[in-house]
Image: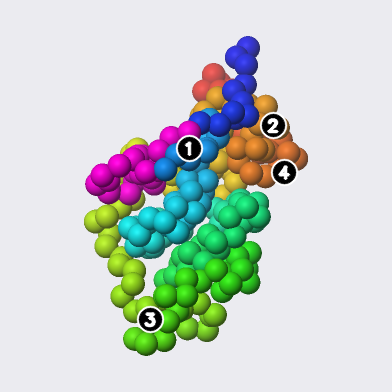
């Protein structure tokens, strides 16, 4: 019997190559950027997305790239998982709340209603960490209309959505197994359980950590998958 892989250690890749490989951002970087701290087996969509949001505070290219990514791929993120991960992350990095809230509002403005759970998590903190220069310029030239009704301000034209800057849905599906499973099963927990199995993670406790869910939920879905696979094998044999 093969031993289940674990995700207890960290790996430390560089920012830009990681965003290119996992999220499919098409960027030409002069330097690989700062070092990240990701889980060794993860290379997870939500975890990587949050790394990008955190880096957006110091990387001026990232806000436009991330909003473009949300435009093309945002409906394939598990927003309840993203909100939970953000809650933990904001304890140490509260400044990322602003850009995460902006991205959530944009997602909602284009019909991705599940971003509401992210905005609920970070919205109150976002206003406190809005860059003063942006608020001042937004007052002078006007704010993005899709931010109307929020406490956030962003100068018109500050962010550019250019879909050629990110991988298309077929391109990202071809290169990213987790994303491909989201297309098959939806942006749901079950997709990430399948992804954990693909990575060789079998113990419910490890699956729970990778998929960010309760152990009972991981156990039930693992049992469902095992029964389904046994049934398929039996049907073929019959």
User: What separation in Å lies between label 3 and label 1 (alpha carbons)?
Assistant: 37 Å
Which of marks 1 and 2 precedes in the sequence? 1
How packed is label 1: few (under 14 Cα within 10 Å), some, or many (20 or more)? some
Q: Are marks 4 and 3 in contact (CB under 8 Å)?
A: no
Q: Is residue 20 magenta?
A: yes
SS category of the residue bearing label 2:
helix
- In this figure, which residue is indicated by the disc labeled 1? 43
Observer-side mark, 4 or 3, equals 3
User: What separation in Å lies between label 4 and label 2 (alpha carbons)?
Assistant: 9 Å
Observer-side mark, 2 or 1, equals 1
How packed is label 3: few (under 14 Cα within 10 Å), some, or many (20 or more)? some
Identify the coloring.
Answer: rainbow
On screen, residue 16 above or below 157: above
Q: Position of residue 212 (x, y in %)?
A: 64, 44
Label annotation for residue 137: 3
Can residue 107 be seen in this snapshot?
A: yes
- In this figure, which residue is indicated by the disc labeled 4? 214
Q: Are marks 3 and 1 in contact (CB under 8 Å)?
A: no
User: What separation in Å lies between label 4 and label 1 (alpha carbons)?
Assistant: 20 Å
Can you tell which quarter of the image residue 217 is in? top right
Label annotation for residue 201: none
Point 72% across, 43% down: residue: 214
- Most foreground residue, 176 or 234: 176
Which of marks 1 and 3 precedes in the sequence? 1
Q: Are marks 2 and 1 in contact (CB under 8 Å)?
A: no
- In this figure, which residue is indicated by the disc labeled 2? 204
Observer-side mark, 4 or 1, equals 1
């Amino acid at each position: 019997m093969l031993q289940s892989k674990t995700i207890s250690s960290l790996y430390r890749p560089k920012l830009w190559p990681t965003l290119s490989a996992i999220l499919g951002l098409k960027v030409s970087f002069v330097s690989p950027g700062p070092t990240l701290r990701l889980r060794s087996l993860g290379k997870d969509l939500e975890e990587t997305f949050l790394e990008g949001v955190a880096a957006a505070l110091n990387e001026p290219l990232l806000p436009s790239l991330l909003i473009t990514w949300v435009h093309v791929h945002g409906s394939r993120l598990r927003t309840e998982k993203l909100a939970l991960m953000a809650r933990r992350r904001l304890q140490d990095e509260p400044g990322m709340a602003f850009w995460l809230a902006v991205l959530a509002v944009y997602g909602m403005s284009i019909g991705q209603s599940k971003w509401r759970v992210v905005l609920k998590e970070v919205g109150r903190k976002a206003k406190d960490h809005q860059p003063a220069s942006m608020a001042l310029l937004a007052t002078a030239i006007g704010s993005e209309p899709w931010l109307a009704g929020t406490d956030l301000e962003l100068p018109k034209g500050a962010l550019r959505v250019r879909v050629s800057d990110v991988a298309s849905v077929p391109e990202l599906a071809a290169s990213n197994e987790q994303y491909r499973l989201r297309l098959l099963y939806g942006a749901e927990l079950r997709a990430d359980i399948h992804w954990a199995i693909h990575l060789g993670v079998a113990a419910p406790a490890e699956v729970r950590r990778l998929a960010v869910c309760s152990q009972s939920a991981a156990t039930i879905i693992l049992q469902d998958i095992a029964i389904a696979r046994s049934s398929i094998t039996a049907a073929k044999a019959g």
